[in-house]
Image: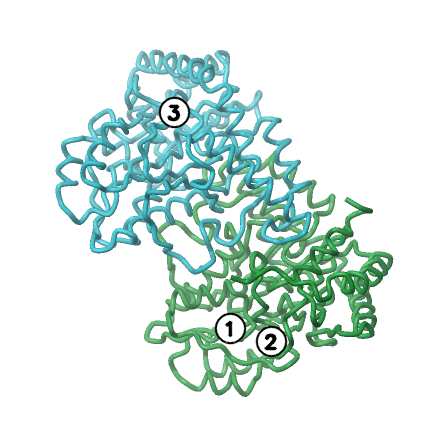
Chain colours: A green, B cyan
Amino acid sequence: MPLTRLFLDASGSAPMTSRTLDAVRAGFADGWADPRRLHAESRRAQSLVEGAREAIADALGCPAHEVAFTPSPVLAIERTIAAVHLARRGRDRILATAIERDATLYAASWIAPGRVETVAVDSLGHLELESLRAALDYPDVTLAAVQHVNHELGTAQRLASIAELTRAAEVPLVVDATASVGHLDVPDVWDALVANPADWGGPADIGVVAIRSRTRWLQAWPERSGWEAGSISVPLALAAAVALQERMEHREATATRLGALVDRIRAAAVQIPGVAVVGDPEERAPHLITLVCEGVSGEALLTRLDKEGIAVGSGSACETDSLQPSRVLGAVGAPSDGNVRLGLHPGVTDTDVDRFLDALPRAMEDVRGKPGPLLY
Amino acid sequence: MPLTRLFLDASGSAPMTSRTLDAVRAGFADGWADPRRLHAESRRAQSLVEGAREAIADALGCPAHEVAFTPSPVLAIERTIAAVHLARRGRDRILATAIERDATLYAASWIAPGRVETVAVDSLGHLELESLRAALDYPDVTLAAVQHVNHELGTAQRLASIAELTRAAEVPLVVDATASVGHLDVPDVWDALVANPADWGGPADIGVVAIRSRTRWLQAWPERSGWEAGSISVPLALAAAVALQERMEHREATATRLGALVDRIRAAAVQIPGVAVVGDPEERAPHLITLVCEGVSGEALLTRLDKEGIAVGSGSACETDSLQPSRVLGAVGAPSDGNVRLGLHPGVTDTDVDRFLDALPRAMEDVRGKPGPLLY
């Protein structure tokens, strides 16, 4: 591989810090036993899980008993949507923003087939409050699913205003915070919340659900399976908590620094002919930015940058195995060809940004006019 | 803690070997990226997952494309039961042995409420073939769920004879191999199989599903979620595969050695007044044995042994957080009070067994007549 690799796709996954890796090692050394058994090995595993739960609850600003782990972030979304929906007996319609993650929309369609209504967003990605108000004006709504920060746009929803409407309608607000926890404070207005440790530099394949004690839910899966679907990986839970603690300790400084780097990228990118930037430039997660490069294939561009040692995201951030055009970019009226999605982890430097900004126009030139992969 | 800890509860969890821990470390170093993206970091993660899938398929004796990972072993059971059941349109009854894991019975009752029929086992824990034949004699059966080795009894089912009946009835045989893979060869007669890496010394919180290409199944969960429920932990998959490879390399030698240790425990235990041993002494997993100690509380005994540094299992092996009497022991007509369940990992020595056999009668004496915890 040429040069040092530069990883600029830190959204939903990021390299782990040495402190988090130490937590993984400690977790496998001390937390390998099944935490549900009764002997000393299991009690130690159990106490590690409880410590992890408390640390995450602390970062979310809720009591530990409102926090549960799931064995995958998508399962956290699926079980939360289903559980809150089913508890609203006599109602059957789910509201979701038009830019929710695919996992949320699929989970909603699964539990409420044909009864999922998407609410429009404006050109910056903000939920249209008047549309939400109108959608809530019927008594059959079970919940409103709102992603705090969209992975592609970076735009942060105005959750306080949204919650005013859902509260007035007495509809639970389910917040997908899988791209905001650890990057941006989540306003304290959710009734249920889902988070993804891999997004804040923790391990993949563990999810977090927080549900207020006041929020009603019904178990929508087999008995005894629980949120954890039978078991939780103690090392992953521990590493998730340690990674979040580390992020929270430096959150403001990191946000200021990465925010400035994203501003630099934004300012430089719009100077490149054929490049546009999507999302709200002010009300946003500090570390995310998506560029839309007219007339080039996003995958070709990604592949070209990858060959130069630079990893970026493309396609829909939430459907990364797909080469379909981005549904999210379509929803805000942006072209979705040639999009390059960046997620900056805390280790990214000014020099890294220089390198990307130097490489991008050359890469665009190289791939312009070349066809992307065939879409079947 | 007094003395060195002696861990004799290696069923469903076991301390990891240094080779498996190395695989975990390598997995976190090289496989932290999301395997579904397109850049070099993701392709490397993807190739690690594929290698792990191939290694596990190899141990199971099936092609890699028939093997999938799930983010928890219980989810593997839940999704397999549901998927095979739903594909059998027009039928609705699930057969399960009376000694299946609770997770299997709960999953079955969830997808087929009121339509789960348990088939009796004999006093050694073998499925009664005549009862199975009679139960299969109706056209409404969707699947037969059979646990190859029961965690508590250690008895290995006669899967070849069972499969003759299910094949004749054209009913899919779903084998729960969560206590046998890595310990005992699984006969090549299953239509779907579920395995638990933590049971063979791999990490907790990852499950394995194998489904024959010929076996029909329908996705019983939201679109795109897949068996993996959105994502797979690459380090856990890698460590699961490496742990299984290590077990398989030494499987016969380990089985001979641990089998002899279990025989020793069995012979010594039945000499202790009030102690009985359950399960088939011949057709069994090499490493499992359950002792039933009359007139004492199983939890009190476990706690007493734990204080002496010896970790054993008690209660139902599959409901380890529960203090309820064991359903499995009830099904074979054994008393379920005072049961001590042992799982021997490959590191257990003759000296360890001496220590346990020395401690057991003293511990029984200590706790005899003392009440167990109240059952509410």
Chain of the residue under label 2:
A
For the N terminus of chain A, the quadrant is: top right
> Circle 2 sits on which residue?
A159
Mark number, residue A173: 1
User: The residue tagged with tag 2: helix, strand or loop?
Assistant: helix
- Three-letter amino acid code of the residue under disc 1: Leu
Instruction: Determine which quarter of the picture holds residue B131.
Output: top left
Q: Are marks 2 and 1 in contact (CB under 8 Å)?
A: yes
Mark number, residue B185: 3
- Cα separation, mark 3 vs mark 2, equals 55 Å
Q: Are marks 2 and 1 on the same chain?
A: yes
The residue at 51%/57% (across/down) is A74
User: The residue tagged with tag 1: helix, strand or loop?
Assistant: strand
Q: Are marks 1 and 3 in contact (CB under 8 Å)?
A: no
State the image coordinates of residue B340 (x, y, percent, origin top left). Answer: 37, 26
Chain of the residue under label 1:
A
User: The residue tagged with tag 3: helix, strand or loop?
Assistant: loop
- Cα separation, mark 1 vs mark 3, equals 50 Å
Q: Nearer the viewer, residue A139 or B184?
A: B184
- Cα separation, mark 2 vs mark 1, equals 9 Å
Name which of mark 2 and mark 1 comes first in the sequence.
2
Is residue A184 left or right of B105 when viewed as pictured? right
State the image coordinates of residue B365 (x, y, percent, origin top left). Answer: 37, 20
Mark number, residue B84: none
Label 1 CA crowd tier, 10 Å (few <14, some 14–19, many 20+): many
Is residue B112 left or right of B197 when viewed as pictured? left
